[in-house]
Image: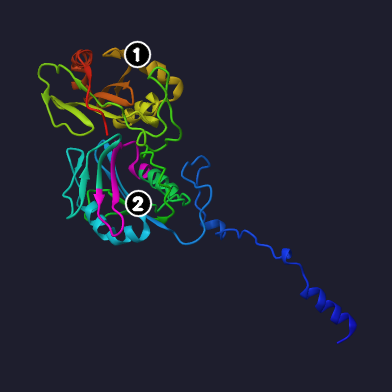
Amino acid sequence: MNRFALLLLILIGCKPAEEIRSYAVPKEILPKETLPEVAAETPSQPASQPAGEPTDRMLGAMLPAESQAWFFKLAGPKAAVDAVAEQVTKFYAAVKLDGGEPSWELPEGWKQAAASGMRFATLQVPSEGKELELSVIGLPRVGDWSKQALDNANRWRGQMKLPPVDQDAATKIDGATPDAMLVDLNGWFEAGSMTPPMMQGARTPVAPPSIGPPVAQNPVAQPQAAAEEFSSTPPEGWREGQAGMMRKATFLVGDAEAAVTMFGAVEMMVDPLANLNRWRDEVGLPAAQAGELNGLKTEISVDNSPAQRFEIVGDELATLAVMTRRGEQMWFFKLKGPKGTVAAHTKAFDEWIASVKFSSGAAAE
């Protein structure tokens, strides 16, 4: 070995330890043609996906009724959810939508806690090592169901620190109510992200000045101090129909229907334009623009609370609707049916609204 080679070996062997560096390895880049096209404002996209194998699993179901959509979600440690996955999926398939609201028979060992905040119900699912929680929340249907389901599935993907997708976010549940969808995700559950599923297009909390005080950022984590109830004097000839958890009253008005519903005052539930466009879609009218809102609403009062009244007339159907905010609750009063029937009962509807009174109920849990 010559003198130069010996010197080279010495230099290599004595290289300082600090020259050994670690580098962040970039995620695998998919070919451009396989990347989903996702709008930049999509709120579900996680800032970064954790390294390593997924630690959690989520099983969610979305069941659409005529005017509402129902969202079931169970999330927890992957091993715990794996152990009950088959049972939970069968439970989703067996849920019935009677009168627009879900009903079920609890599997052996499951428990049902009292409803609270935005939740229609909380189900406790036994599992080895940790009891799992299955939440049930109902919200209005908005526009095309496939778009609303995709938007919510991507919101759930965000909670699991997964990127959004533009298709195949859910699968149909065999044997379930029509158009019921299952979302099965492995990821890293962000337990603090408990905002209820919003309607398609929801992006940021909105609190119009005419509706009331600012919106609570997390209505589930900050439940209502007190739940209010309402009373009214229905007009002569209105027949009482079936009520429920969120549908506080139903009246049959000839071949039309009047309903009272109550939801938590969150995101688009407090937005007059979003609600107006939901009602316009129900009667076959195109969406209104923000600049048209003032000409399409009437400011009124319901039991001394500011409210907004809308009259929406389509080719065949019509709707009279009133929305008002009471603390952290949004109340909706609506008469919908053939436009001739609705027109004939317009005066009776307004008299009914004038008779509404609110009263404090028991504190929500």
Question: Over which residues does the magenta segment extend?
Answer: 124-148
Residue type at numbered disc 2: Ala
Q: Is residue 231 above or below residue 41?
A: above
Q: Is residue 218 visible?
A: yes
Q: Residues within 10 Å of mark 1 (few under 14, many from 20)?
A: few
Residue occupied by mark 1: 299
Q: Quadrant of residue 266?
A: top left
Q: Position of residue 192 (x, y in %)?
A: 41, 43
- Of residues 322 and 280, the one drawn nearer to the viewer in this rendering: 322
Name the residue carrying label 2. Answer: 75
Can you say whether 107 is above or below 284 in the image? below
Is 91 displayed left or right of 35 in the figure? left
Q: In the image, is 298 to the left or to the right of 190?
A: left
Q: CA distance from mark 2 to mark 1?
A: 43 Å
Q: Name the amino acid type tagged 1.
A: Glu
In this view of the protein, which residue sits in the foreground, 86 or 117?
117
Residue 174 picture location, percent across and down: 24, 56
